[in-house]
Amino acid sequence: MSEFYIGLMSGTSLDGADGVLTDFSGSGVRVLASATRAFAADFRQELLALNSPSDNELHRGALAGNLIAMVYADVVADLLRQAGQQNIKKAQIRAIGAHGQTVRHQPGSNVATRYTLQLNNPGLLAELSGIDVVADLRSRDVAAGGQGAPLVPAFHHHVFNQPEASVAVLNLGGIANLSVLPADASLPVSGFDCGPGNALMDAWCLRHTGQVCDASGNWAAGGQCIPGLLQQLKDEPYFSQNPPKSTGRDLFSQTWLAHKLQNFATARPQDIQTTLTELTASACAESVESYAKDSKLLIVCGGGAFNQYLLQRLQVHLPTHQVSTSERFGLPPMQVEAAAFAWLARQTMHRLPGNLPSVTGAAGPRILGAIYPA
């Protein structure tokens, strides 16, 4: 039976949908095709608005889920065209792993109030694509008392583990998450959300330059870090919490940032960008130093891997580590998360657990997701 799966990811950066066609027939993963679709500016703003309470949000959320499924279907169509050029038929693709767009993430100890919400319409995606869809991949872990995030450490272990050395993997999406892969196979894989990745930097850059992101970190590189502001940002209690922990725009929002900036009204916007970049770099580096002490290699993936200034700051904070992007290890940075959700779909279709209780804090391994047959 074929082991072709499609993975679709749209993350907290709100930049669009990434997709990959993967082959798991060997011991690792091969990415056979990739495609992406950017979200229109007005749709990006609507998704951002839906992260907070607003008028008529049930209706608007349902419409946004429909549009996400339609964007996903366009990405799948691109992947199928590329698959056809490789003589891979649609019928050979076992399933699509579709993450959806997270707009609320509220894990907690109270079973009546904990939940995670990803906007999507997997039934519509199955209808449009003609392929089985695996979706809602986080809620079962939350139901089992876990954080529901991050889910990628299990996949990181599958593709980046090195038996002779401990490895740290940093995914720099809108939120940054760290995976710790110990060389000792008897030790559990660990991982957690470090805090903001690109979300605050991107929002500030868009507001003051009109650009959706600080390409290569050039704007931040030309500014000066504001020590008092950096300390104010790092006073957030989340940074001192012990894992398991996860976060999102529920906490690290523009409202949160505006509150932190109250005493810095006269600061140059460029210097604030530099400080936000330093916040991400220092928080991630401190997480590595605290929880991945034995590692000497930090593999970076996600959109933040293209921010050269951010990578430089990570290297400064971690002088004994080799900081490299995932490209060097066989997976381009923008393909890693989509490939992870292809792998999670495969786990579900094989009735295998997709979560790691050592990462999320769930009561045990769980088969994740719901299957929407074609």
Image (cartoon, rainbow, N blue to C red):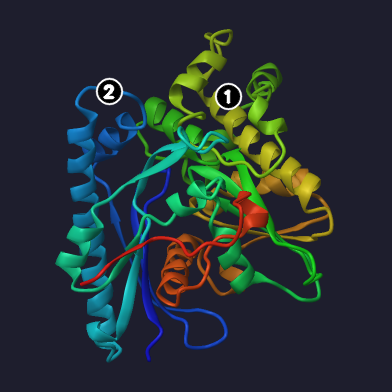
**The C terminus is located in which quarter?**
bottom left
Residue at image mark 1: 271
Q: Work out whether 247 lies above or below 372.
A: above
Give residue 339's quadrant in the image: bottom left
Residue at image mark 2: 54
Residue 309 x %, y % = 61, 44
Q: Tell me which amino acid carries mark 2.
A: Ser
Residue 179 visible, this orientation: no
Residue 70 x %, y % = 19, 56
Question: Of the residues under marks 1 and 2, which one precedes in the sequence?
Answer: 2
Q: Residue at x 37, y 89 (%)?
A: 2
**The N terminus is located in which quarter?**
bottom left
Q: Work out whether 47 lies above or below 324.
A: above
Q: Residue at x 50, y 41 (%)?
A: 198
**119 or 30, which is in the foreground?**
119
Q: Tell me which amino acid carries mark 1.
A: Asp
Q: Work out whether 159 lies above or below 272.
A: below
Q: Work out whether 79 lies above or below 303.
A: below
Residue 113 visible, this orientation: yes
Q: Residues within 10 Å of mark 1 (few under 14, many from 20)?
A: some
Q: Residue at x 19, y 49 (%)?
A: 67
Residue 36 x %, y % = 32, 61
Residue 255 x %, y % = 45, 20
